[in-house]
Amino acid sequence: MASLAQTPDLFDAARSLGVSISPSTPTIGAEISGLDLDRPLSSAEAELLRAAWLRFKVVFFRDQDISHESHVRLGALFGELEGHPVIPSVEGYPEILKIEGVEGVQLTAETLAPFQAYNKWHTDVTFRERPSIASILRARHLPPLGGDTMWADTAAAWAGLPQPVKDRIEGLEAEHDIVRSFGGRVTEEKRAQLARDFPPVRHPVVRSHPETGEKILYVNYTFTSRILGVSEEESDSLLRLLFDRIKVPEYQVRFRWTPNAIGIWDNRSTQHYAVGDYWPEYRALERVTVSGDIVTR
């Protein structure tokens, strides 16, 4: 599958199946049409979908009014599904997370200002020893305007770093902590439970993608608390620089949701950001998350 993702044959394979792939930017993202995600995909269609996902890092579909069962089946094409310790799930479907507002926090008059000021760029659940490899997000209820999601190519972010910075950070590890993000939105009792259940974990600052071989910048503002093995001052300085690299527009794609649109992203080689610009309107999406493996250099 990876070989198909890395060659022009991907587009030939798509055409042979009656599928269209339209890249969204020169760097990241593509819209796909011609697949009905509410039915089981053939082996050739599933291989094509996975190859496009690897190549473009996030792929989008429009007008896919899929059932909950189809959503779970679609996620299972990428691996075993997992729940979340804080974000609630859809009743009767523990694999499907109910994403209301910004990363599970509904926007209100009280939460709007702090969340618009917060740097929400992140890779999902890097607080886990085995962070997820993929997420499949489906639009359910959208505001009339706003509520876009942005993705950044973290392989491009790594490639664009100055060589002295690459030399300094390659080989270092960083700590990722669930309390850094979710600790402020739960009770003290729940915060203590999260700290017990998910103690801080270490991941390489620069990882290798196990399927494409790309080097990837693997720190994010939401969960990465510090770089290990350096002074606190240098850790803070390096993290500010690395977090800012994700904000470079040339590494990004911005997706405007439409009813029943779906986004599927490679959680190993992207970060994403839910834009909180639609209050007092309401936004709700549903997500399945695919379990991952140990992060390696």
Image: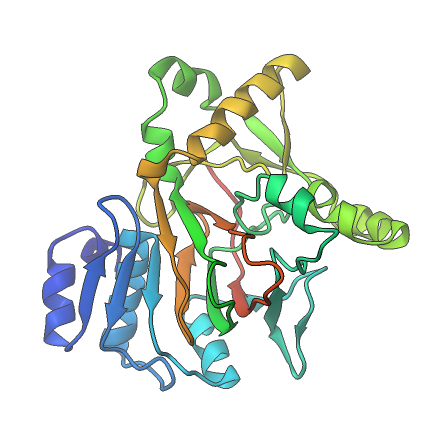
**Which quarter shows the N terminus?**
bottom left
**Against 237, is 116 above or below?**
below
Q: Residue furthest right?
A: 189
Q: Residue at x 40, y 70 (%)?
A: 258
Res 94 quadrant in image: bottom right
Res 178 quadrant in image: top right
With 66 as the anchor, is 212 left or right in this view? Answer: left
**Against 28, is 143 above or below?**
below
Question: Where residue 101 sits in the image (x, y, percent)?
Answer: 61, 61
Q: Residue at x 44, y 35 (%)?
A: 246
Color encoding of the figure: rainbow
**Which quarter shows the C terminus?**
top left
Q: Which residue is drawn at 27% across and 58% down?
A: 30
Q: Between residues 227 and 145, which one lies in front from this camera angle? A: 145
**Against 50, is 3 above or below?**
above
Question: Where residue 169 sits in the image (x, y, percent)?
Answer: 48, 21
Asked if residue 35 can be seen in this view, the reply is yes
Question: Where residue 72 sits in the image (x, y, percent)?
Answer: 50, 77
With 18 as the anchor, is 83 left or right in this view? Answer: right
Question: Where residue 296 sits in the image (x, y, percent)?
Answer: 47, 39
